Image (tube, grey):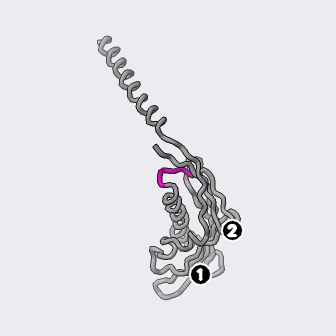
Amino acid sequence: MKLTHILAAALLVIVGMAAVVPQAQAAALVNTTPKTVVVTEAQINSSYRITNPIRRSVTNKHVTLGDGIVTISATITHRDGKTFDVVTVWKPSISAYGTLIFGFQSATVNGQPATATDKAALRFVHQYIVRDTIRDYIRSQVHGAFKYNAITVTPGQVSIDVNVYTR
C-alpha cells in the first residue's frame, strides 16, 4: 500500500514537471514591444460610440480632454420631453493589473451638482464610453494583445503607453 502511494506521488511529480516545461517554452515565444499611442480629442469625438450613442435620448455628446481629466457633456431628453444638460468629470489611471480605469470625479445637471441618484445613473452611462473608445483605437493601432502601462491626458489629446504582445 505504501509503495502504491509512493509510485502515485512520483507519477504526479513527473506529470507536473512535464506540464511546466511547455508553459516555460510558450512564455519564451511571446515578444513584448512597448508602444505609445496618441488619441486626439477630435478622434474621440468623431468615434462611433460618441456620434451614435446607444440611447436615443442622449444628444450633443462631447468629450473634452484637459490636464489629467476627461470631461463628458451631453444633453439627455427625458420621456416627458424635459431636457437636461449633464457634465461628468473623470480621472483616468492605470491599475496595478494594467487595466484602464476612469475614476469618477464629479457631475452636474443643468449647472447644479448632481444628486446621488443622478450621479449613479451618469456613472453607469458615461463611465465606459471614452474608455472603450480609447481601447478600440489602441486595438486598431497595435493589431494584437496589449496591456496598459501609463496614461497622460493633456488638453486636446491622450497619450497611452502599452506593451504589445506578439508571438
Say whether residue 144 is magenta: yes
Q: Nearer the viewer, residue 140 or 100?
A: 140
Question: Bounds of the magenta span?
Answer: 143-148
Can you say whether 148 is above or below 157 in the image? above
Can you say whether 161 is above or below 154 in the image? above
- Residue ID at (49%, 60%): 140
Tag 1's secondary structure? strand
Q: Report the number of discs.
A: 2
**Which residue is the site of mark 2?**
155
Residue at the extreme bottom: 81
- Residue ID at (50%, 46%): 165
Q: Nearer the viewer, residue 72 or 148?
A: 148
- Prevalent SS, magenta region: strand
Which quarter of the rendered picture does the N terminus lie within? top left
Can you say whether 31 is above or below 77 in the image? above
- Residue 29: percent from left, percent from top: 46, 38
Q: Seen in the image, is 51 located left or right of residue 18?
A: right
- Residue ID at (38%, 26%): 18
Q: Seen in the image, is 37 located left or right of residue 11?
A: right
Instruction: Work out how far the residue at label 1 is from the one at label 2, CA to CA, in angstroms.
Output: 22 Å
Query: Badge 2: few (under 14), some or many (20 or more) residues near its Cα, within 10 Å?
Result: some
Task: Give the number of the disc on residue 85.
Answer: 1
Say whether residue 100 is magenta: no
Q: Nearer the viewer, residue 2 or 47?
A: 47
- Residue 56: percent from left, percent from top: 45, 80
Tag 2's secondary structure? loop
Q: Please state which amino acid type lies under the numbered disc 1.
A: Asp
